């Protein structure tokens, strides 16, 4: 049995907080399918604005993607300096260059205190946040990335299908 992924205080959210549509994505920063979904999700946010509340949760597939875990930790470390979405976007926009060193370059580019970023990147609480996201995905029946939930229901399809469904449901 899978559990509905309830949105909570620990989640990274953007969009309308009184939105009629909640989208939760479980993603992996190194996954090519997540990388392909990223611009479509941006388009969804631009198109539907405050009608949508978008949540991103880490689901690093470590066996398949060498930098997935450290990239998730980098986004969480950036969150401690209120720059989660800036790091999230920067990682996906530069996915092909992903490496440990490049994450530090991105941290600098988005204006993080790089020394603090280094500390937060390796903090036990940062690793725990990523692991908690992952476990939440497992409990909700996630077995690949990207996985989407719309208003608590697992959405079977990719980002293009999500855009089409949203256009139909808001007409």
Image: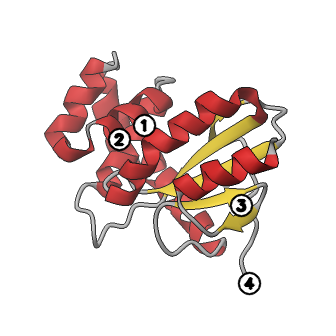
Q: Distance between the residues labelled 3 and 2?
A: 23 Å
Q: Position of residue 23 (x, y in %)?
A: 68, 49
Say which mark, if any, is on residue 92.
Answer: 2
Q: Residues within 10 Å of mark 1 (few under 14, many from 20)?
A: many
Q: Do the residues labelled 1 and 3 touch (CB within 8 Å)?
A: no
Q: Distance between the residues labelled 3 and 4?
A: 13 Å
Report crowding for label 2: few under 14, some 14 to 19, many 20 or more residues within 10 A (C-alpha).
many
Q: Mark 2 or 4 closer to N-term?
A: 4
Q: Mark 3 points at which residue?
A: 5
Q: What element carries label 4?
A: loop
Query: Residue placed at 54% from the left, 53% from the top?
Result: 160
Residue at x 33%, y 47% (from the top left corner): 71
Nearest to viewer (mark 1 / mark 2)? 2
Q: Is residue 9 left or right of residue 37?
A: right
Label annotation for residue 107: none
User: Label 1 to label 4, Cα distance in Å?
Assistant: 30 Å
**Mark 4 — residue?**
1
Residue 112 spot, x, y in % from top left: 34, 20
Kindly give the residue lying farthest to the top in the view shown.
Answer: 111
Colour theme:
secondary structure
Q: How many marks?
A: 4
Instruction: Determine contact: label 2, label 4, CB under 8 Å.
Output: no
The numbered mark, 3 or 2, whose residue comes first in the sequence reads 3
- Residue underneath mark 1: 88
CB-based contact (under 8 Å), mark 1 and mark 2: yes
Q: How crowded is mark 4: few (under 14 residues within 10 Å), some or many (20 or more)?
A: few
């Amino acid at each position: 049995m899978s559990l509905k992924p309830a949105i909570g205080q620990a989640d990274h959210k953007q969009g309308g907080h009184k939105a009629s549509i909640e989208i939760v994505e479980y993603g992996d920063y190194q996954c090519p399918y997540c990388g392909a979904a990223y611009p479509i999700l941006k388009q969804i946010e631009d198109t539907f604005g405050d009608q949508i509340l978008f949540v991103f949760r880490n689901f690093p597939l470590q066996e398949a993607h060498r930098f997935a875990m450290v990239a998730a930790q980098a986004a969480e470390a950036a969150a401690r300096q209120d720059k989660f979405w800036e790091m999230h976007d920067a990682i996906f926009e530069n996915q092909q260059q992903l490496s440990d060193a490049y994450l530090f370059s991105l941290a600098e580019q988005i204006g993080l205190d790089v020394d603090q970023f280094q500390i937060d990147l390796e903090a036990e609480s940062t690793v725990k946040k990523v692991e908690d996201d992952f476990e939440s995905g497992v409990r909700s029946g996630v077995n690949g990335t990207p996985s989407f939930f719309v208003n608590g229901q697992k959405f079977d399809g990719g980002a293009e299908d999500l855009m089409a469904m949203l256009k139909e449901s808001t007409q």
